[in-house]
């Protein structure tokens, strides 16, 4: 059974953009989250169940990879969205890397299903504006995003822009500081990935024990088959 | 590698997503775990007429031995009346504690993160019955990702045992509800035996197997009735649950109804990554039941042990499974005893320990390492004993240390003497979960209304 909170190690990775980087951990952990392995059960058929609405997915101010300001709702557009909160220096294999890995697997599944690919957008949103500038988040995203896929990487100008969105999505974060008050680049947070429908309603939330590309992909198809919750 | 928060080195918050550590091992696995010394126990307490203000209340006890106010009530917040306070549960991020009343069906959501030593009422859900189309008696408050699953005990049509479950966002907004399967509406479930009573009680999930397991108790007509009167009413005694239902956790659809006769109550599932089983106990027949997935992938139920002498109606109530899945604490309300079973072979538990704790006993919660075991006494307002044999405690909160062989008393709080009421569900709190520093403790409890 999984503890859903995770913390990170302190050191910052080399942000080389020239080296191929896979959505896999830099070190092998003791136990991997279920999302890294084949699904351990037969999932219910897409469309055979319902995904009730949690309510509207909150809006918020963001910075795109080009540094231009915008909003989450603008980023969502008229797509089904899979939203993941991450930060690029997260090294907890069962934390942000898991989320990015799963989204990458969903990306692969979407590319094999052109009927729905154009209806879906992946969004990775950093809650570390201090380190994840637009340039950094864009470079990070380029390691995982296929050239033709619809996968946005977003950030913010700072905590003032970020915190209302985190609060609205129930994403608390505890940042680590040294005795002088300097940010150490590590933080604690609950891993959550959100499934948002075309009407911008949250239809599911996944945490570490639940997050799996097969489940997310099935839910995407279910939401598309059942536009009304 | 994990970092501790500045100044708070007393323990680590466990972060690995599939580790099997747990505090008070009965909670949902989808939440942060406290690995180390807990700071507080939040006790959802039933008001008693003539005891203090007579109101239900959330009582906070300091349980950190390094604290100046160790073993003292440091905070209490009263809830404006008696609601039949019963069970509580934390959200998956441990920032809010949901506590519900079986009579008024109100759910109180407490903020326990702003100041863990002073929970504050954040929101009250007072339309549970209407919103859920008639589910009465919110019982289990169980954390799922970003939401709470609430099991019911009864309904507003006949106040019998037919009931359902509901889901709310962590913020307290209604998402959906579903009724338990019955003979006239199995909802696609396989009825494997004689019963499909539609009753409910507890719920636990095994995400690896996409399984949700629910149990069955009785309805408002019974749980709000005087115990002696009920036991003398043959018709009332027929209206107890006899089922455990296995659900498709993702689809929230019932898959199989298992016969578990005699009111199966609390469910505790094993923590091991390959352990596809849970335990429950039957109040009326005094047995431990194993709910397990067999080698063919079918869920089964099997009685695996007796608890005391069933003819004396010990009445098993709360249970707690150890973090290593090797032991199961079982309380029996009527004789006030706790029993420990070796469940290393889940198909053949054996009792290895027994001790009298009080005149009556209900809840048991243990620390993550099993070295601290907490007990409370209250079951239901109209069932609790009102007289005690000399020397026995009636309404208490007790801490024992456990070394694998002996339960050693550490402290005991008499909740009636303290003007608080009848203590029930316990949940743990800790400052380090929220990176907050402990505030200076006070020796006198602060009360709020």
Image (cartoon, rainbow, N blue to C red):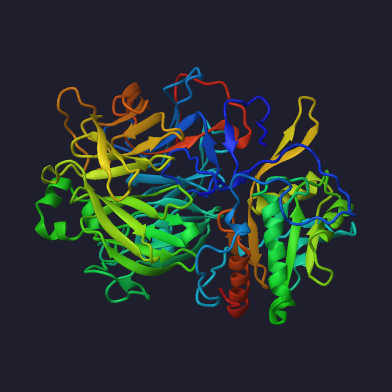
Residue depicted at x 72% and y 34% = A176
Q: Quadrant of residue A11?
A: top right
- Of A171 and B120, nearer the camera is A171
Relative to B416, residue B103 above or below: below
- Of A144 and A81, nearer the camera is A144
Q: For this view, does B251 lie left or right of residue A118?
A: left
Relative to A124, residue A25 above or below: above
Residue B380 in view here: no
Residue depicted at x 67% and y 54% = A98
Q: Quadrant of residue B292?
A: bottom left
Residue B153 in view here: yes
Q: For this view, does B402 lie left or right of residue B249?
A: left
Relative to A143, residue B17 above or below: above
- Of A73 and B186, nearer the camera is B186
- Location of the C terminus of chain B (image quadrant): top left
Residue depicted at x 70% and y 82% = A115
Relative to B412, residue B189 above or below: below
Q: For this view, does B25 lie left or right of residue B190?
A: right
Q: For this view, does B38 lie left or right of residue A25?
A: left
- Horizontal and vertical percent position of residue B184: 28, 76
- Horizontal and vertical percent position of residue B32: 55, 43
- Horizontal and vertical percent position of residue B334: 19, 39
Q: Quadrant of residue B88?
A: top left
């Amino acid at each position: 059974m999984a503890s859903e909170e995770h913390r990170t190690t302190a050191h910052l990775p080399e942000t080389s953009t020239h080296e191929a980087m896979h959505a896999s951990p830099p070190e092998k952990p003791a136990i991997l989250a279920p999302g890294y392995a084949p699904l351990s059960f037969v999932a219910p058929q897409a469309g055979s169940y319902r995904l009730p609405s949690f309510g509207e997915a909150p809006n918020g101010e963001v910075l795109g990879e080009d540094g231009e300001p915008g909003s989450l709702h603008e980023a969502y557009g008229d797509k089904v969205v899979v939203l993941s909160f991450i930060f690029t220096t997260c090294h907890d294999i069962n934390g942000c890397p898991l989320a990015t890995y799963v989204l990458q697997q969903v990306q692969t599944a979407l590319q094999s299903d052109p009927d729905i690919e154009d209806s879906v957008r992946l969004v990775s949103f950093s809650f570390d504006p201090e380190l994840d500038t637009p340039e950094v988040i864009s470079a990070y995203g380029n390691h995982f995003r296929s050239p033709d896929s619809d996968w946005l990487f977003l950030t913010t100008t700072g905590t003032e822009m970020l915190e209302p969105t985190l609060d609205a999505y129930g994403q608390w974060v505890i940042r680590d500081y040294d005795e002088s008050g300097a940010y150490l680049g590590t933080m604690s947070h609950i891993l959550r990935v959100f499934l948002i429908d075309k009407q911008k309603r949250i239809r599911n939330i996944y945490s570490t024990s639940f997050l799996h590309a097969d489940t997310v992909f099935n839910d995407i198809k279910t939401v598309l088959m059942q536009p009304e919750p | 590698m994990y970092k501790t928060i500045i100044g708070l080195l007393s323990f680590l918050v466990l972060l690995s997503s599939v580790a099997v550590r747990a505090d008070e091992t009965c909670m949902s696995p989808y939440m942060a775990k406290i690995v180390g010394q807990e700071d507080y126990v939040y006790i959802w307490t039933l008001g008693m007429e003539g005891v203090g203000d007579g109101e239900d209340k959330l009582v906070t006890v300091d349980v950190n031995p390094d604290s100046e106010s160790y073993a003292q009530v440091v905070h209490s917040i009263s809830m404006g009346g008696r609601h039949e306070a019963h069970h509580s549960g934390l959200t998956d991020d441990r920032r809010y504690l949901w506590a519900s009343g079986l009579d008024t069906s109100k759910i109180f959501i407490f903020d326990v993160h702003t100041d863990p030593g002073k929970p504050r009422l954040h929101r009250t859900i007072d339309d549970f019955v209407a919103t859920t189309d008639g589910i009465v008696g919110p019982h289990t408050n169980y954390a799922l990702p970003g939401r709470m699953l609430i099991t019911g005990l009864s309904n507003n049509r006949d106040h019998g045992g037919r009931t359902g479950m509901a889901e709310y966002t962590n913020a307290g907004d209604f998402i959906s509800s579903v009724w338990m399967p019955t003979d006239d509406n199995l909802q696609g479930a396989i009825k494997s035996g004689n019963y499909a009573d539609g009753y409910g009680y507890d719920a636990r999930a095994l995400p690896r197997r996409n399984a949700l397991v629910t149990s069955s108790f009785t309805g408002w007509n019974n749980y709000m009735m005087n115990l002696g009167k009920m036991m003398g009413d043959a018709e009332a005694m027929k209206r107890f649950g006899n089922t455990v239902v296995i659900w498709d956790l993702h689809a929230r659809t019932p898959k199989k109804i298992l016969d578990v006769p005699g009111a199966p109550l609390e469910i505790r599932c094993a923590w091991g990554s390959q352990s596809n089983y849970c335990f429950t106990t039957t109040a009326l027949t005094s047995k431990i039941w194993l709910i397990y997935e067999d080698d063919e992938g079918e869920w089964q139920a099997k009685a695996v042990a007796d608890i005391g002498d069933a003819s004396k109606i010990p009445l098993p109530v709360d249970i707690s499974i150890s973090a290593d899945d090797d032991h199961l604490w079982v309380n029996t309300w009527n004789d006030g005893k706790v029993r420990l079973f070796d469940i290393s072979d889940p198909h053949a538990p054996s009792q290895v320990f027994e001790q009298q704790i009080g005149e009556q006993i209900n809840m048991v919660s243990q620390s993550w390492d099993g070295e601290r075991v907490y007990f409370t006494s209250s079951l239901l307002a109209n069932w609790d004993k009102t007289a005690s044999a000399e020397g026995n405690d009636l309404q208490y909160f007790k801490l024992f240390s456990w070394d694998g062989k002996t339960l050693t008393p550490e402290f005991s709080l008499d909740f009636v003497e303290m003007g608080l009421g009848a203590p029930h569900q316990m949940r743990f709190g800790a400052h380090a979960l929220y990176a907050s520093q402990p505030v200076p403790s006070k020796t006198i409890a602060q009360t709020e209304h």
